[in-house]
Image (cartoon, rainbow, N blue to C red):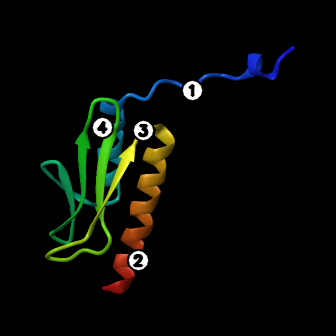
Amino acid sequence: MSDDAWTIPLPPFKPADALVTTRRSLRDLKLAERGDGFEFKARRVVELTLADDHLVARVVRRPAMSPEWETRRLTSGADVRHFIDDVRRRLARWEQDD
């Protein structure tokens, strides 16, 4: 018997559901939601956009008046969880720097 017979396929990624979950998680991190983005101490630090089959997430390296943005393509639940964990680490670092 082949090992392939025992693999369970991953559930399909639903970007609209992931967007709702991601927004909730970012609000739980005490970020203020403003339109399609989230703010930390009145500075925009995260932006989320819904695409056809994925989410586009932009996050700043450091909060600033003219921040440097990093863009990520979230195509699975694991990508979303990794993104939220990364934002959590950045928030902790930003809090320490203040």
Left or right: 74 with respect to 19? right
Going by the numbered disc 2, the residue's amino acid type is: Arg
Compare residues 87 and 30 and report the one nearer the observer.
87
Left or right: 18 with respect to 37? right
Going by the numbered disc 3, the residue's amino acid type is: Thr
Q: Quadrant of the C terminus?
A: bottom left
> Which disc number belongs to residue 10?
1
Q: Check disc 4: other Cα within 10 Å, few if <14, some if 14-19, many if 20+.
A: few
Q: Secondary structure at mark 4?
A: helix
Give the mark, 3 or 1, whose residue is nearer the N terminus.
1
Q: Secondary structure at mark 2?
A: helix
Mark 3, residue position: 75
Give the mark, 4 or 2, whose residue is nearer the N terminus.
4
Q: Quadrant of the N terminus?
A: top right
Query: Gap in Å between the C-alphas at discs 1 and 4?
Result: 20 Å
Going by the numbered disc 1, the residue's amino acid type is: Leu
Q: Are marks 1 and 4 in contact (CB under 8 Å)?
A: no
Q: In this rendering, which labeled residue sits more in front, label 4 or label 3?
A: 3
Query: Gap in Å between the C-alphas at discs 3 and 1?
Result: 12 Å
**Residue under the point 25% across and 71% down:** 68
Give the mark, 4 or 3, whose residue is nearer the N terminus.
4
Give the mark, 2 or 1, whose residue is nearer the N terminus.
1
Mark 4, residue position: 20
Q: Are marks 4 and 2 in contact (CB under 8 Å)?
A: no
Residue 37 to residue 20: above or below:
below
Q: Secondary structure at mark 3?
A: loop
Q: Position of residue 54 (x, y in %)?
A: 34, 36
Going by the numbered disc 4, the residue's amino acid type is: Val
> Which disc number belongs to residue 93?
2
